[in-house]
Structures are given as C-alpha cells and as structure tokens.
Image: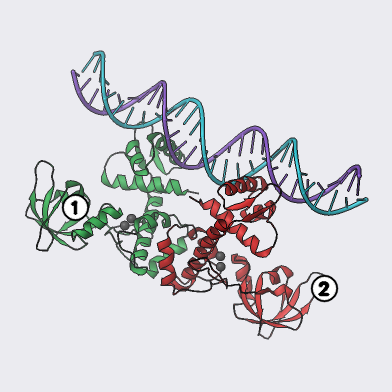
Chain colours: A green, B red, C purple, D cyan
Amino acid sequence: MISFTEENYLKIIYKLSAETESEISTNAVAELTQTKAASVTDMLRKLSEKQLVSYQKYQGVRLTEKGAEVALKVIRKHRLWEVFLVNKLGFNWDEVHEIAEELEHINSEELVQRLDEFLDYPQFDPHGDPIPDKDGKMPELGYKNLSGIAINQTVVMMGVAQHSTSFLQYLAKIGMNLGANVTIIEINDFDKSMTINNGGNSNYFISHEVAKNILVKKK
Amino acid sequence: MISFTEENYLKIIYKLSAETESEISTNAVAELTQTKAASVTDMLRKLSEKQLVSYQKYQGVRLTEKGAEVALKVIRKHRLWEVFLVNKLGFNWDEVHEIAEELEHINSEELVQRLDEFLDYPQFDPHGDPIPDKDGKMPELGYKNLSGIAINQTVVMMGVAQHSTSFLQYLAKIGMNLGANVTIIEINDFDKSMTINNGGNSNYFISHEVAKNILVKKK
DNA sequence: AATAAATTTTAGACAAGCCTAAAAAAATAT
DNA sequence: ATATTTTTTTAGGCTTGTCTAAAATTTATT
Ligand SMILES: [Mn+2]
Ligand SMILES: [Mn+2]
Ligand SMILES: [Mn+2]
Ligand SMILES: [Mn+2]
C-alpha cells in the first residue's frame, strides 16, 4: 500500500526529475513538499526500502521504474480530474489545482478508466499539460519557457509551469491564455524582464519569474 | 479542521442515531469503524472537546448540532458522488459505495455545489437514500424494513440499508431492484426467514438478515 | 443484595509523518 | 590545503490514530 503522503513525495520527485538530469537533492524535495529536510530524509529511506526510489545518503534521490509508474498514475489522475472540473463542472482553470490535489489520491483503476472515457480521452489538461495514458506514456512536447525566447520572435503559448490561482488569474488579466500569439518586444538585460505583445493594442511588461512559468512553442 | 477519521466517526454516529432514540454505545461505534472500543473512547473524548458530540464516560454518545451538521455534509457528498458514478460514469449500483467512501472526504463547498447542479439536483442516491440539501435538510421517508411487514401484504422496494457489493449483487440476482413489488408469501416463526414474490413466476426464500436490509413502503 | 458477566475506560505502547537542534559530510572560499 | 559555509543526516521528541492488557464501572443473574 502506498499512502497519500508517499504518493505526493513520488509525484514531486518525478516533477523535479523532469527538470534535471542529475540526482534530486533533499532540499529541493523539502521545498516542494513544504516540509523540513530532516523529514525528507526519513521519507526517502522509507521509499527506498519500498523500492520506489534509489537513494544513498548524501547522494540525492532518483525514482525507480516502479516509483515513476506510481508518480505517473497520480499525475494522470490529477490532470483528468482537472479536465473534469473545467469541462464538466464549469470551473475556471485557475480554481481547479487545489481540488485536484485531493482527488488525485482516490484509489480506483476502474474509476480512472471510466473518467477518462467520460471525458473523451483528453490529451491535455486545462493548463496545457499532457495527460499520461493508461500505461503511463506521455508525449515529449518540447515546449520552451518564454524566458528563453529571443527578441522579436513570435511564439504560441501552450502551457504553464505553475498552477496557483494567483498566477493564473494574473495571466488572465493580461490576456495570456492558451493559444495566444506572443511576440517579444524587448528584453531588459539587468533582470531579464520583458515587454511582450499578445495580439492586443497594448504591450505588457512581465518579470523573468512570470516568463519562466509560461510554456511556448515556435510558430 | 476536521480530519478524514473524525468525519468517519461522525458519520457513523449519525447513522446509528437514526436507528435508536437513546445514546450510542462505544461498542456500536467500534463495530462500524472497525476499530477497538479503546480507540473509540479516545476519539469520543477528542470529538467532545471539539464540541462535535456530547459525551460523558460510561454514558454513551450523541451528536451535537454542530456534529450533525458535519455528518450530514459528508453524507450529502457520499450520496452525490454515488449518483455521479452511476448516472454519469455508468457504474453499477453495487460498485460505487467504496469509491464514495473516499470521495466523500474531498473538501470543497464549491465542488459539491457544482456537482449537485451537474447531476440536476438529485433527491435520491442509487440505493434509494435521500440526499441532504445544502442546508442539511433531508426528508423523513418513513420506509419500513421488509422484515417488519406482515404476511400477504404487498409493498414497494424503496431502498437498501446496506451498500456492500456482495449484498447488492445478491439482490440483483434474485430480482430485487428499486421499485419492485414484493409480496410476503410465508414467514417462518423460528428464524423469521421469509418466502417472497417480487413479480416473477418463482418465489424467493430470504433470510431475516436480508429482509432487515431491504427498505419498503406500503402500496 | 451479592456475584458474575459484559461493557467501557485507562495505561502503556507503536507506526506514520512531522518537527528542532546537533552532528556529520560535502561544497565553496581563502 | 585549510577554513568556512551549506547541505544532509541523526537524535530525540510530538501528534494522530491505532492496539493490547488491565482496571473500573455498569448491567444481568442468581
Ligand atoms: Mn494542477
Ligand atoms: Mn494541470
Ligand atoms: Mn454508499
Ligand atoms: Mn447510498
């Protein structure tokens, strides 16, 4: 049996792994789980005993095949429930992440299967994240962060790397929705903030932090 | 904050209260929570401190207004989710109880409200149980147990007092579905088992235990 | 009314998941 | 190469929810 808490650790280690080649550090996990490093060490030892991660002290952590499988199932459920909440219950995309954080731990293969069917086998969640299929397969999309795009280039917004209500509401306010065409007007050297245009008459000024959390693809 | 576990205790005390006038005993709670009496005593003290139950040692327990309110909210969620699982995802009525036991603890008023709307404000769950409204109001239906019906009487099956898969599958097998017309053909004095007819050519012989868990109303 | 039986509570313990403070190891700077 | 800083682990402790065994209380029986 894998507990609610263990599932959350696995999911977080999975996400960190997607951003890094190397081992994941104890501190990185502690930050995302909102716990202290000492607690993470305890949990890593436990997950290691269960063969869900490979871990040797001071060496960082990595998911095993089995651990990645569990993480992908949780992510699949999270994203399917988000689709349900937005497409069927009429929630806004900025309201669903926290609820999905709870729903993702409901245990029933049959439920996930039927939910997937009910939603018509969606490929992406409301934030543009791909939904792993039954076997944990998920397309590599190769989206880039807006922060890495050069001046004068035009790109299409495909997703967000953060699901907090405040961030998503801010994006809505400046007209940054999935599918928007975004042109980089200007980049400030000193803090990497940028001025962008997303189709409207007026340009917007966004911080590097914001640009990092917007996922785009080239036109 | 009310934990998952506390919610389950409150729900169980609520259900036991519906069947009895008097105080609920520690042992009765222990049986339904599948824990030991000692654990129940601990929890009752805690719930009492939180003003969710009134409890004095050796005197049994009763829900306070506040406790009943919490219990009704959990029951409302349980039943709405069961409707969702059957009506929208196509589950059979005998497959949904365990999943609803998990879903009933998801915390979001907004979610419950929207789910209710999505399901078109259902009044009953798939097992014939009434669904409490937003304010915790629920009709008194006055259904009787089939075990209390006299010989030669015909009644209509309106619900079940137990949601286990095995019980519900057994009912399906003998053609006992909601809405069935049931006539008592014979009652055996010694063990209160009965022979019934539910519309088909052949009669069925059912135990007292089964009859106790079938809810009916007079025609 | 006294005794026996059943129920309930208390006492003490344990696992899960978290914490703080101190020690150990690794990384960085001098 | 040493010293300093940062990261990670260990040690010990806390809370929640559970358990078993023993003690207290209530209920039932003679
Ligand atoms: Mn999300
Ligand atoms: Mn998402
Ligand atoms: Mn149920
Ligand atoms: Mn039900």
Q: Residue at x 65, y 50 (%)?
A: B55
- In this rendering, the answer to whether B138 lies above or below A164 is below
Q: Position of residue B32 (x, y in %)?
A: 64, 56
**Quadrant in the rendering for residue D2:** top left
Subunit under mark 1: A
**In what element is the residue under mark 2?**
loop
Residue that badge 2 annotates: B189
Quarter of image, ligand 1: bottom left
Quadrant of the frame with the C terminus of chain A: bottom left
- Respond yes or no on whether mark 2 lies under 8 Å from ligand 4: no
Instruction: Point out the frontmost of discs 1 and 2.
Output: 2
Identify the disc placed on residue A144.
Answer: 1
**Quadrant in the rendering for residue A165:** bottom left
Q: Position of residue A213 (x, y in %)?
A: 22, 51
**In what element is the residue under mark 1?**
strand
How far apart are the alpha carbons under marks 1 and 2? Answer: 78 Å
